[in-house]
Image (cartoon, rainbow, N blue to C red):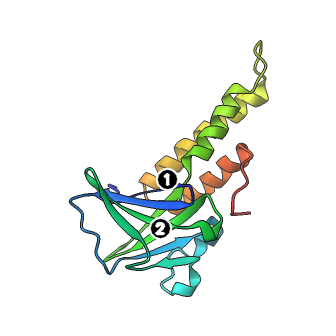
Amino acid sequence: MVRKYKCYINNNILYIETSNTEVISPSVIFYIDRLSNVDNIHETAEDKHCKVVKSGGYTKETISDKQVIKIDISELEVNEVIVTIKESTDSHYLAYDITKINEKLFSLLTTFCNTCIDKLQKTRIASALFRYILIQQAYELDKIEDAVKSYNDLNRILNISNSCT
């Protein structure tokens, strides 16, 4: 499945990118949910979602060859969200702050004895990288619930506290 949008978080701002050839309709609605609210991502009632953003509730810019929508999510106090983009058909995206994951992965790869690496450390490294790949594949296959499960597993392996607990 080819994804129309790319979603990510940086400094409590949710970025939603699309190519410049795509037209973002003013009637599009963005439902933003914490990972703990994954059961409600298919709900149509606005009160079932953590945040609902309609036209005017976001800033829109054109940067080089893409359109970027920026939504402030600081009131949610999270580093990861599920974004449902309500157009003619709904599409779901897992957006997270990749810098937190990369920092923890780097720390995991560099914190061991210089002369040896124990079996448990090797298992944690392999498990973390495997979960990271599972997140990406579940996302590409549009299995958002599976991506959320793998993301939570990765956070547990890397000892990152997230908003889903």
- First reached walking from the N terminus: tag 1 or tag 2: 2
Residue drawn at 64 percent across, 32 percent down: 106
Q: Quadrant of residue 49?
A: bottom right
Give the crowd class for mark 2: few <14, some 14-19, many >=20 residues within 10 Å. Answer: some
Residue 58 position in % (x across, y down) = 42, 72
Q: Quadrant of the C terminus?
A: bottom right
Q: Is residue 57 above or below residue 10?
A: below
- Residue 150's disc is none
Asked if 144 appears above or below 44 in the picture, the reply is above
Left or right: 149 with respect to 89?
right
Give the residue drawn at x 75%, y 46%: 159
- Please name the residue that numbered disc 1 is placed on: 138
Q: Where does the image place residue 47, in percent across and percent down from the top left?
A: 57, 86
* Residue 131 visible within the image: no
Residue furthest out toward the top: 115
Assign the N terminus to one quadrant of the image: bottom left
- Residue drawn at (77%, 25%), measured in percent from left and top? 119
Residue 114 percent location from the top left of the image: 75, 15
Where residue 30 appears, as percent x and y from the top left, is 44, 74
Q: Nearer the viewer, residue 152 or 34?
A: 34
Q: Is residue 134 above or below residue 110?
A: below
Residue 59 lies in quadrant: bottom left
Q: What SS does tag 2 mark?
A: strand
- Judge left or right: residue 87 versus residue 145: left
**Which residue corresponds to the image point at 50% horizontal and 77% vertical from the top-left?**
42
How crowded pointer 1 is (Cα within 10 Å; few <14, some 14-19, many 20+) is rated as some
Q: Amino acid at mark 1?
A: Ala
Q: Amino acid at mark 2?
A: Ile
- Report the mark closest to the observer, 1 or 2: 2
Badge number at residue 71: 2
Q: Nearer the viewer, residue 160 or 38?
A: 160
